[in-house]
Image: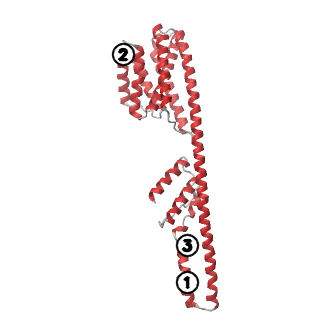
Amino acid sequence: MLSMLFVQQLMIVLNAKIALGREKIQIKDIVFSIAGAYLIGYLSNFSQLLAMTIFVSITCIYLYLDIHNLETSVIAVTMSYLAGIMLDHFSDIIVDSFKLGQLYLIVLIILEIIFAISLSLFVKYMRNRQSYVDIQFTKLESILAMVTSIIFCLLIFFTEIRQDNHLNNIVYNLILLILIVIIFFVISYERVQQTKRDYELRSQKQRIKNDNRYIKEMEKHYNELRKFRHDYQNTLLSLDEYIKTDDIDGLKQYYDNSIKPISSKLNSEKYKLEDISRVGNKELKSILFNKLYSAQMAGIEVTFEARSSINDFYVDSLDLALALGIILDNAI
């Protein structure tokens, strides 16, 4: 009995942590599972319904102390608990169908291991997808998950425990549990899709904002260069009179006072942002040009150097653009 409770408690903790991307079993998890098994075993002598309720509650508290997010803890533990019940029912059916007698615990462990590995592979697949986004659960969702768990505990108590675990009741409860899990999966899938759509919409708005800002700054920069070219052409035309009259002294004086400052202006940092064109991402190009050009306008010496094209960033471009904007603002 204690061995079975220990396996169930440990797997509930492990599966909940796997669902949250934390796959390593720690010593504290084993200690907690052993203590939980003894506590639940003791409470079962008085009330198995109370034992099952505490079984879930203490696990939620334990996980909350680890991740410090109550809603996520409740959702993860509830889903792990329902999965554990489903595997327990499958074990009962397999043992009864194949007359395996005392091999229930071994069958349960095998199913728990298969489920944990499958869950781990699924979570890794989802997290490796570029479209993956983290979902924050609400209090209402956590309450609904906990209520569902409590209702199912009551169902098991009145249809199985109090009726000596008849196989028919186990099969009916398993079918009902599978339906509940499917409903949860469909709701969760729709929630993920909606979250992704909202994220993509925000990303698109941010990209449009960055593109517009980049175009505006480029127009400003182009107008300034056009004005400079016009002034420079007038300056070159003004040399004509000095050359025609062979006024070398006047030409030298004019060069020192007018031409030389323009030459220095051409070499100033203000015109040393051309390498930004090698950044192969509009959002980052917009952020870099806007921030660096604004810094130059404020009198800050700035240069940007990229000797080759930059196309691989390995992270979400919107997240990188936001982070880069904050870093440059702080630097300025």
Say which element carries label 2: helix
Is residue 78 shown left or right of residue 262?
left
Q: Residue at x 59, y 52 (%)?
A: 209
Q: CA distance from mark 2 to mark 3?
A: 83 Å
Alpha carbons under labels 3 and 1: distance apart? 15 Å
Residue 208 x, y percent position in the rendering:
61, 51
Callout 1 environment at 10 Å: few (<14), some (14 to 19), or many (20+)? some
Q: Give the crowd class for mark 3: few <14, some 14-19, many >=20 residues within 10 Å.
A: few
Q: Does residue 304 appear in this view?
A: no
Q: What kind of residue is marked 1?
A: Tyr
Residue that badge 3 annotates: 266
Q: Is residue 1 left or right of residue 92?
A: left
Q: What's the amino acid at mark 3?
A: Leu
As measured in the structure, the alpha-carbon distance from the residue carrying label 1 to the one carrying label 2 is 98 Å
Label 2 sits on residue: 43
Whether residue 156 is situated above or below residue 182 in the rendered picture: above
Q: Would residue 56 be visible to someone looking at this image?
A: yes
Image vertical order of residue 47 relative to residue 310, above or below? above
Nearest the eye: 8 or 160: 160
Seen at 39% across and 18% down, the residue is 3
Say left or right for 84 vs 312.
left
Residue annotated with mark 1: 255
Q: Earlier in the sequence, mark 1 or mark 2?
A: 2
- Is residue 237 left or right of 271 when viewed as pictured? right
